[in-house]
Amino acid sequence: MRFMMITKERKQADPDAMPDARGAATMMKYMESLAKAGVLLAFDGLRSAAMGTQVSFSEGKPVVTDGPFPEAKEVIGGYWMIQVNSKEEAIEWAMRCPAFPDFAIEIRQVLEFSEFPAEVQAAAAIYPRLKAQCRNRPGT
Amino acid sequence: MRFMMLMIPKGYEKATPGTMPDAKIVAAMMKYNESLQKAGVLLALDGLHPPSMGVRISFPRGKPKVTDGPFAEAKEVIGGYWMIQVRSREEAIEWASRCPGSDDCVIELRQVQEMCGFPADVQEAARGYTEFQSGRSRPA
Amino acid sequence: MFRRPRGVIPSSSLDDPGRRDATAKAACACQRKDGLIVVVTTRDPRRAIDAVWRIESARLIAALVRMVRDVALAEDVAQEALVAALEQWPESGIPENPGAWLMATAKRRAIDHFRRDQRLERRREQFARESELRQEMAGSEFEVAMGDDIGDDLLRLIFIACHPLLSTEAHVALTLRLLGGLTTEEIARAFLLPESTVAQRIVRAKRTLSRARVPFELPRRAEFASRLRSVLQVIYLIFNEGYTATTGEDWMRPGLCEEALRLGRILAELVPEEPEAHGLVALMEIQASRLRARTSPTGEPVLLLDQNRGLWDQLLIHRGLVALERAREMGQVPGANVLQAEIAACHARAQTAAETDWARIHALYDALIEVMPSPVVKLNRAVAIAMATGPAAGLESIDALVGDPSLRKYHLLPAVRGDLLSKLGRLEEARAEFERAASLTRNARERELLLNRAGCQAGRAKPI
């Protein structure tokens, strides 16, 4: 099963701020443990939400809004994509994440093509071909 | 440049476990996904099960705390994402604007952090893991 | 594609109606929210239009080439449509279907061109072209013009850009220009050339194609295969130019890797039955996965076996492995691209350098030599043999290459030989080889590295 571990931060990151060396080192160690266990499929950090953009649709027209978005209490910092055998395992891994202040992880299960009902699968016939994320552990 | 397009479908925060997307919407989305693929810009994409099937790990007082979804405070949640490779932020915005989303969805664009954007000491910390380094023997 | 008109500058009291300068920032789009005016967005119309051009231009030009049967004219009218867009869209907003708008505008310009030529007594074919154009316009199936045909049109354009009448440099320039949508200036920066050189190259290339009246149909069978090979070579050439660029240089240069990847992916979708196309994409994805690990923080190149694999991009590696699988599924005898991709995949799958499957790499090089017996391949094969079997076996394989005239000036041959001799404890000979290698390389950093290694050989108990 694949899970997306989405990191959430309460404070809006200063767009010019860079992560400090020790924080990065701690995080790297954690990610290394995910990789060594063969569960880490992909990961990325995202540039601050202040530099992000939202595209919404109003009466059918795309509306482009630049960040920061003051209403948002939390912002997404990044994600890890993991492959494990159960939700409990995903939770276990998330609990091992270093405890940064004002920080949380949201675990969301990836919706796989095989889970779609038949008529949705038919509508999404090309989906498997588009998929780029690994279904298997790296190296297999 | 890489961007994550985070799909935020309105109302997904209330979706019950096992909610499946509508076949017609999926068909329209697949056409869009295919256009990204044919343009050579699509790197990855996934749909996510609703938050009612998710879990949140926070770290109050430094200890992990597990909360089952749905999450009361969350007014907007992610339903899926695309990872695209483009030459400018404007190009990412243009692609996001072409998503066949109705007024019911918002797309948040976040640029992916490239490692070389970090200062040297952070990069160094990230490199300092012997397990990741080659097995080359050092001279006596 | 269904899209609603988008206002780049919607009306509001803060608008400056006098602004027509397309390069100026758009007036703020504002919304009333809880009694406060909230600035929603400031968007530079020029950059937004550039983004649309990046997305639409290749398909636009491809369709136009089919219609007007002339690359130069097709590009000219496409550019004229862009100019019109830059003039009109900042006020009217980007249209619902920008591709169709550009196409309609370009077609009108094309008809103008034909009409002008008509007064100068031009050829009968162009009359026929014009009436064909009129029919297409009357049908007003703008969607169709950019719809199902477009795959063929795009492939035709890719193939024309790599026509055998043109030089490789022209192939590169034309491909980046017509398919990449890069400006002359961008291409010049990417290849460290004067802008005028690139401009001339493109003009001459288009003139050659016009004069020769090259057919605009896709070539068949053997010619198709050979043209496809050219296309793949050109794409890889672009990739390599980007790959060898060092950080700190103009970002356009490493940007070539992304450009080549994008072109390769597009091509693979157009010829999905061609394993070598998928092989090339696989090779590029996997090589690109190492971009962050290739240079040290101080800018020195880091050899593959020394790279921090934690910095290898797993997403790209996975994409590469998927592309490779697609090629293998077709069950054909692997060609050069697929084999090179397989070798790259061997490295990519190894979590550490020590886990590398050298025996498999050796076998792959044995196969690669059959289809690509270049000196570099022979050398790499010798290295693989050394890693798989031991330095003595590797040395034997290298010694067979020493007399090869094509390798006489190649610094890596003595460098590798020196490395193997060093591992065998033959330090004096190793030193001589490193010195020889240093004398052959033109790269100052490499020379330093090699002389360093030469110096290390003397008086060391354990070889490096």
Image (cartoon, rainbow, N blue to C red):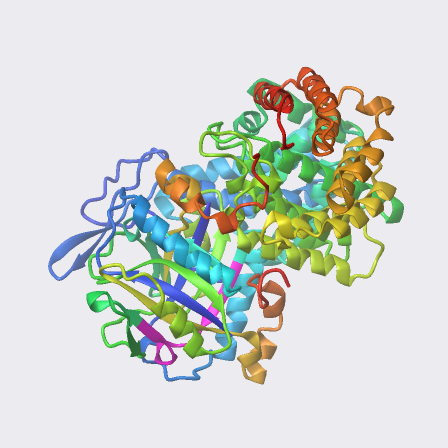
Please tell me whether residue C213 is drawn above or below residue B15 in the rendered image: above
Q: Residue at x 56, y 38 (%)?
A: B138
Residue A8 visible in image: yes
Q: As displayed, is residue C5 above or below residue B116?
A: below
Residue C122 in view here: no
User: x, y (%) of residue C360?
Assistant: 76, 52
**On the picture, is C214 further left or further right than B74?**
right
Residue C463's quadrant in the figure? Answer: top right
As drawn, C31 above or below C452: below
Magenta-span inclusion, residue C92? no
Comparing C86 with A102, the one in front is: A102
**Number of labelled discs?**
0
Residue at 56% across, 28% down: C184
- Magenta stretch: give its range: B44-56
Where residue C150 sits: x, y (%)? Answer: 66, 53
In the picture, measured across the screen, residue C395 lies left or right of residue C106, that is: right
Spot the residue most to the left: C35
x, y percentage for residue A91? Answer: 38, 74
Q: Quadrant of residue B8?
A: bottom left
- At 80% from the left and 31% from the top, the residue drawn is C375
